[in-house]
Amino acid sequence: MAAPRSDEDFLRNTGGMQPELLAYCYRMLGSVHDAEDLVQETLLRAWQAYGGFEGRASMRTWLYRIATNVCLRALERRERRDLPVGLGGPDADPDLPLAPERPGHSWLQPLPDALVASAASAADPAAVVGSRESMRLALTAAFQYLPPRQRAVLILRDVLAWRAAEVANLLGTSEAAVNSTLQRARARLADAAPVADEVVRPSDDAERALLDRYAAAFESSDIDALMALLTDDAVWEMPPVPSWFRGRAAIGRLVERHCPAFFRGSRVLPTRANGQRALAVYMAGEDGTYHAQGIHLLDCVATTAPDAGAVAHVVSFHDAGLFPTFGLPLVHRGVLVP
């Protein structure tokens, strides 16, 4: 007769799974806050059923089955999360007032890299690069256009590289049904996020240098220096503001007219999210302190050489509520130290 399963057994067998479960739930929901809640619900349900776990499937498969069911149920009650670029074309004139925020609208959120860091993948540079690409914000946004079941199949098969038989077993269906669902999901994803030429990323050193120059230009309110870092057709969006803009000239006028942190004074702190470089921006207050203003997520591309780059896309999340998720304070006094 098998010995009773203890809480210590459960924690030992599931503790290392939390980061990848969080990444999975995030890809499904597009919200770091929702994903954290659903991982906790997954682990609670697993703990409650742990005494009956017979080991017919691996612990990983069992947890993913629970997480998938939890996510699918949650998606029945939630609207799609998106970014401003998913709502229509760019605004024409940044000198006009921005479109008003949409109360209650659900926006895509960034996922801090630190929450899903894996010691195993860190030992393999190729795994690190692949993991970063699979977490990029644009891809996560595209996932949200898929029906929930298609979303789960596509993530499990194409992102996590599960075999069709494994996904069929997890979902309680046939391999033929999984393959059919996967083909529909791929076609729909191609419509939602058409792939142009393969994007070439700058080297890590070039990206770091680009981030440093971006931070310096922002803190010194140097609009010319900031714009010089952008590609000609760069995109800038600012959820929860629905307006977004394309092109260096339009973005320059937008920042000067509508970005108070830029012209009032700011301090920035480097971070990472969705496998991309990011900056936490603090705006100067009247009391001499700096207050959380937003997270700038940068999409960088290589330019004339592998060691050079430019910023092709900025998503400026105007949500101070994200700062605690990044482990950052809401108020900073004095100089920010990375």
Image: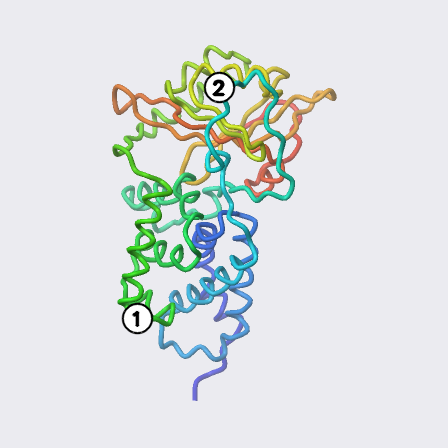
Cα distance in 3D space between marks 2 and 1 = 50 Å
Give the answer, above or below, for where 151 lies relative to 4.
Answer: above
Residue found 50% across the figure and 81% down from its top: 4
Q: Residue furthest bottom?
A: 1
**Regarding mark 2 in the picture, which secondary structure is present there?**
helix
Neighbours of disc 1 within 10 Å: few (<14), some (14-19), many (20+): some
Residue found 49% across the figure and 69% down from its top: 10
Q: Which of the colour schemes (rainbow, by chain, secondary structure, one colour) is used? A: rainbow
Give the answer, above or below, for where 181 lies relative to 139.
Answer: below
**Regarding mark 1 in the picture, which secondary structure is present there?**
loop
Q: Sequence-wise, which precedes: disc 2 or disc 1?
A: 1
User: 189 or 316: which is nearer to us?
Assistant: 189
> Where is the N terminus found, in terms of image quarters?
bottom left
Residue 79 % position (x, y): 54, 50
Residue 212 % position (x, y): 44, 22
Q: Is 237 placed left or right of 208 in the picture?
A: right
Q: Is 247 placed left or right of 42 in the picture?
A: left
Give the answer, above or below, for where 168 lies relative to 32.
Answer: below
Q: Which amino acid, mark 2?
A: Ile
| Residue hosting label 2 | 251
Residue found 25% across the figure and 21% down from its top: 305
| Residue hosting label 1 | 174
